[in-house]
Image (tube, helix red, strand yellow):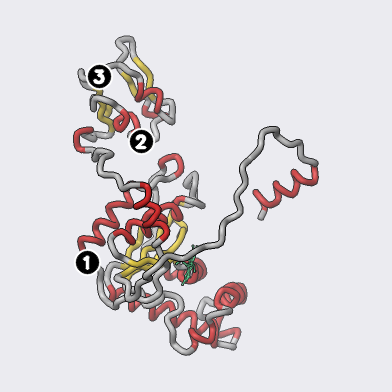
Amino acid sequence: MEFNVNDKCIHCGKCINDCMGKALKFDENRIPVLDETKCIKCQHCMAICPVGALSIMGKNPDESELPDNLPAPEQVLNLIKNRRSIRHYKHENIDKEKLEKLKNMLNWVPTGVNNHGLHFAFIDDVEVMDEFRDYTNGKMLRVLSCCDKRNKILMGITEPVVKFLTKKFARYKDSFLKGEDIIFRGAPHMVVVSTPVDAPCADIDPTIALSYFELYARSLGIGTCWCGLAYAMIKVFPELCEHLEIPENYKAGYVMLFGNPDTSYPRATQPEPCRMISVKKGIKNSTIQEKAKRFFWNFVR
Ligand SMILES: Cc1cc2nc3c(=O)[nH]c(=O)nc-3n(C[C@H](O)[C@H](O)[C@H](O)COP(=O)(O)O)c2cc1C
């Protein structure tokens, strides 16, 4: 891997101090040297250098964006408070430039151990989305309406799948059967995030990526909706993963719908406060039963 320190280096050691993988140390001339085997490629060494003397992975520090022009805290908070799940969309493609901005932003989302193995399957085109919607809704219709067990198995719809989806759809069944697009909410676009099954933080990386996505989308005037129902469909019908070209040894992490909103919210919500505590000093010695309970909740459930 390319790693260069030029003669602007002031030997301050900030890069070494900040290196998460302990991959950097000074040589005999107090110039940082890299042990590639420990490097997680986070580029903190380049980002922290006060004089821009360090380059890694062939990156030119002068091409990095500078942390100016950041939004004020109240602007960030306002964005968070005025993000809404959008369930009514215009049946049109979003502006291409905005789409590219959204895609590009995803390169900056954090992943555990800087794994950056996420895969994003975008449905960019409203016609492709309509096809996906019709196919998936048809599948769900058969789950809800086909009573013949043998027929269901032939269609890849097993009893556990029926149980799982029927439970998820309990409150929407009637509207769905009347033709309402309960799963996709009429969205013209969708993104499915997948993660390598063995990524160090496979359970959380996709969620983080979509959280960034929805906030940035909101700032661009694009509506989004987390889609647990589409995620459920993708989980149980493997052909959907094939269609979305989710790579081998990857698992779908979550789904987000997006598009130009056909609705607006003139005010924010007023959520009930979450439960929060401030931890006190003095570590408690819990009983064996308490420990067993916690272990069960944390690892088994
Ligand atoms: C993990 C997750 C899954 C969700 N799945 C769906 C879904 O399948 N369909 C839907 O219409 N909304 C879905 N939502 C949106 C929530 O219902 C929504 O966040 C909630 O109603 C509050 O509205 P707000 O997001 O506008 O504050 C989901 C939200 C999250 C966080």
Q: Secondary structure at mark 3?
A: loop
In the figure, residue 111 lies in which quadrant? top left
In-image side of 111 versus 294 (left or right): left
Which residue is at the front of the view, 281 or 31?
Answer: 281
In-image side of 148 versus 140 (left or right): right
Label at residue 9: 3
Where is residue 19 drawn, in percent x and y?
Answer: 40, 28
Q: Is residue 255 above or below residue 157?
A: above
Q: Amino acid at mark 1?
A: Asp
Q: Residue at x 32, y 18 (%)?
A: 12
User: How far apart in space, not on screen, are marks 2 and 1 (Cα)?
Assistant: 33 Å
Label at residue 5: none
Indicate which label's residue lies in the foreground, 2 or 1: 1
Q: Residue at x 26, y 61 (%)?
A: 99
Where is residue 164 drawn, in percent x and y?
Answer: 59, 72
Label at residue 41: 2
User: How far apart in space, not on screen, are marks 3 and 1 (Cα)?
Assistant: 44 Å
In the figure, residue 145 lies in which quadrant? bottom right
Q: Secondary structure at mark 1?
A: loop
Label at residue 95: 1
Q: Secondary structure at mark 2?
A: loop
Q: Is residue 293 above or below residue 81?
A: above
